[in-house]
Every structure is written in C-alpha cells, then in structure tokens.
Image: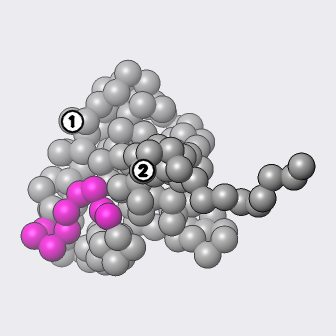
C-alpha cells in the first residue's frame, strides 16, 4: 500500500514529514490512488466514524497530539498538510459519505485531533501529568 519506508499508522513526526513529501511528489500519484482505495475500505456508519477511523489508521495517538487544524501551540497544521486532501478523497470514496461537505469532514477532523491527548493518556493507563498542585 505505502512505500517501504512509510508504515501506517505514522508514529513519529519524522514519518509524518516523510509521508507529506511522498504525497506531494507528482510521480507518486498512482501509489497515492492505491492508498486512497485501501483506506476507503476502512468504512464507518456515518461521516464522523469514517473520518475518525481513517485518521486513526493514518496517525498513532502519540503523534496525533502533535498535530491540530491550525498549527497553534507549536503543532503541525493539518489544514496545510497534503494528508488533508488525501483524507477528504478517502472519506468521499465511501458510499455512505460520498456527498459530504468539506465543512463536515473538517469539523470531525478538528475534534479528532483535539481528543488526541485523551486517547494517548488512556492507552498509558489514564495517568496525566499534574497541571498544578491541589489547593487546600
């Protein structure tokens, strides 16, 4: 599905960068189409589940909390990434979600990245670093 040096889900920012370079390269268009076809088989019962299932296949929880829609707080801006157009293409390849708007996919994408830290924390046993000492 993907080149040998790119494994999904992407687990490090370096892998995210490599995937972005791969997606931008015009000569990789046939491989990009194969990735779209493969990811489109993931499915889901509505636009939210389809979007979240695809994002979950693309990005590990550990790397997803280093990305957000706008790139605020020193994170990567998904809205500027080539993976955004890949995601939109994959979502629209699903028969249930073929006519969704960019706004619908965007809304669910933003939420998925916003919840990334919670997903990563749950997988580590629910322990979050303390934010401030409790007040008496």
Circle on res. 31: none
Q: Where is residue 72 in the image (x, y as percent from the top left)?
A: 66, 69
- Residue at the outermost front position: 136
**Which one is closest to the eye, mark 1 or mark 2?**
2
| 26 lies above or below 8 | below
Q: Nearer the viewer, residue 65 or 42?
A: 65
Rendering quarter of residue 31: bottom left
Name the residue nearer the viewer: 129 or 101. Answer: 129
Q: Position of residue 29 (x, y in %)?
A: 21, 65
Q: Quadrant of the N terminus?
A: bottom left
Mark 1 residue element: loop
Instruction: For residue 69, say whether it is visible.
Output: no
Q: Where is residue 26 in the image (x, y as percent from the top left)?
A: 25, 74
Give me the disc on residue 124.
Answer: 2
Residue beneath disc 1: 41
Q: Element type at marker 2?
A: loop
Which SS does the magenta portion mostly show? loop
Please report the residue visible at 50 percent of the width from the left and 44 percent of the height from the top: 126
């Amino acid at each position: 599905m993907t080149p040998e040096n790119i494994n999904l889900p992407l687990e490090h920012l370096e892998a995210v960068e490599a995937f972005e370079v791969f997606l931008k390269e015009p000569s990789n268009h046939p491989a990009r189409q194969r990735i779209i076809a493969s990811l489109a088989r993931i499915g889901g019962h509505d636009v939210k589940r389809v979007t979240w299932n695809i994002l979950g296949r693309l990005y590990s929880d550990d790397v997803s909390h280093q990305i957000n829609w706008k790139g605020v707080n020193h994170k990567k801006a998904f809205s500027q990434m080539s993976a955004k157009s890949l995601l939109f293409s994959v979502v629209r390849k699903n028969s249930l979600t073929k006519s969704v708007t960019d706004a619908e996919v965007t809304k669910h994408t933003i939420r998925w990245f916003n919840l990334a830290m919670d997903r990563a924390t749950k997988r580590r046993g629910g322990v979050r670093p303390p934010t401030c000492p409790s007040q008496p």
